[in-house]
Amino acid sequence: MKKMKVMMMLMFFGMVMVLVACSSDETGTSEKESSKKGPSYTLRYGHQHTETEPYHAAALKWAEKVEEKTKGDLKIEVYPNGQLGPDEDMLEQMRAGTNLASLSDPARLGDYVNEFQVFYAPYFLRTLDEIKKLQDSEVVGKWESKLEDEHKLKVLSFGYVQGYRNVFANKKGTSPEEFKGFEIRTAGSPIWQASINSLGSTAVSVPYGEVYNALQSGLVDGAELPYAAAYDFNIHEVADYIMETKHIYQMNFLVISAPWFNDLPKEYQDILVEEANNAGFEISEEIAKKEKEYKQGLIDKGMEIIPADKMDLKAFEQSGSKVYDNFKLKEARDAIFKELGK
């Protein structure tokens, strides 16, 4: 009897151990899973470019490096094709402290701090090296501080360079005089439109995603774009000529909500800025190297090119000088030129 009780107790103890083990196995996994937390910080990054354009690749690279360096604690979600709305709407959301960043342009930032517009005035900057030299610019730094202090927008980088903007059209000309009557698609900001009007043409505001249809339908005679964007748009299907006006050397600003950024740990702030610059300049170098390839690709597809040395660039530049006066940008231009030794 005593032996039987001992056996029963051993059997009972064994069953308990099995149950505990099973419970431990089942709940242990869930406890481990529950202990796995997601990122402490999530940043949504929206831009207007397609998934096939270089800037989207740069965005993915930035997100990858930031997540890697923060060990997954800061995650960047990338939304192309304007999925998060127009640039203007995103900027206002950032000012309200939303976990949002976007690739914006100097024209839009000029709505907050006028001096930023100088970057899109005609024939201002000319090379990627000039933009690199301005990374430590005291002048630009003051504009950035004003943007952050007064408008709650933080500049992470302005190393996103698309290169020269040229005119792709169904009419051709080589001077401001010959450009009269040309209706050229551009963005809606005043500085951009003024710069295009200074070429002798008439600026027409059309959303970026509708450039192809606007040319195809004859709504406009042409569009002004960098080579990479023109190639991505298959511009050769709806335009016959490339005119190398080189009127704007296009660069963009990666901006973020200043309140949200300033709440991050200092280490994460540094990582965001460092990797934003790395991704930007890396893709800018790549775009610069591929510009000849994009140009030749469009020529091979049937477009006729009027190269820069056949365009009256001096006349275009002289015509564009009045933009600096009209937008009160002469002082900003001269300050930057002084830093660059121009």
Image (cartoon, rainbow, N blue to C red):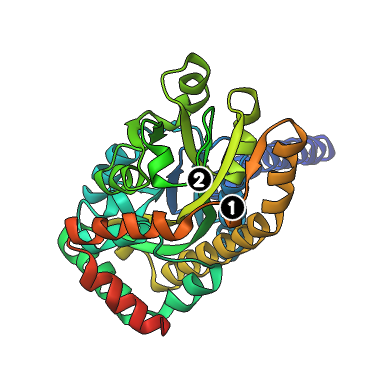
Q: Tell me residue 83's x, y (percent).
A: 44, 31
| Residue found at the very far front of the displayed protein | 177
Q: What element carries label 1?
A: helix
Residue with the mark numbered 1 = 310
The amino acid beneath tag 1 is Lys
Q: Which residue shows up at 59% across the image and 31% down it?
A: 233
Q: Tell me residue 158's x, y (percent).
A: 44, 63
Q: Can residue 331 be seen at all in this image of the molecule?
A: yes
Q: Which of 299 and 227 is in front in this view?
A: 299
The amino acid beneath tag 2 is Thr
- In which quadrant of the rendered view does residue 23 lie? top right
- Marks 1 & 2, CB-CB < 8 Å contact: yes
Question: Residue 150 has which mark?
Answer: none
| Residue found at the very far top of the displayed protein | 217
Q: Tell me residue 212's x, y (percent).
A: 53, 24
- In which quadrant of the rendered view does residue 3 lie? top right
Q: Nearer the viewer, residue 211 or 242?
A: 242
Left or right of 316, for residue 68: right
Q: Which residue shows up at 67% across the image and 58% down it?
A: 286
Residue 76, above or below 328 = above
Q: Which residue shows up at 26% across the image and 43% down it?
A: 93
Residue with the mark numbered 2 = 174
Q: Which residue shows up at 51% across the image and 62% down it?
A: 276
User: How far is disc 1 from disc 2 in space, using C-alphas?
Assistant: 7 Å
Point out the image quarter for the C terminus: bottom left
Which of the two labelled residues, at mark 1 and mark 2, occupies the earlier sequence position? 2
Residue 199, above or below 261 = above
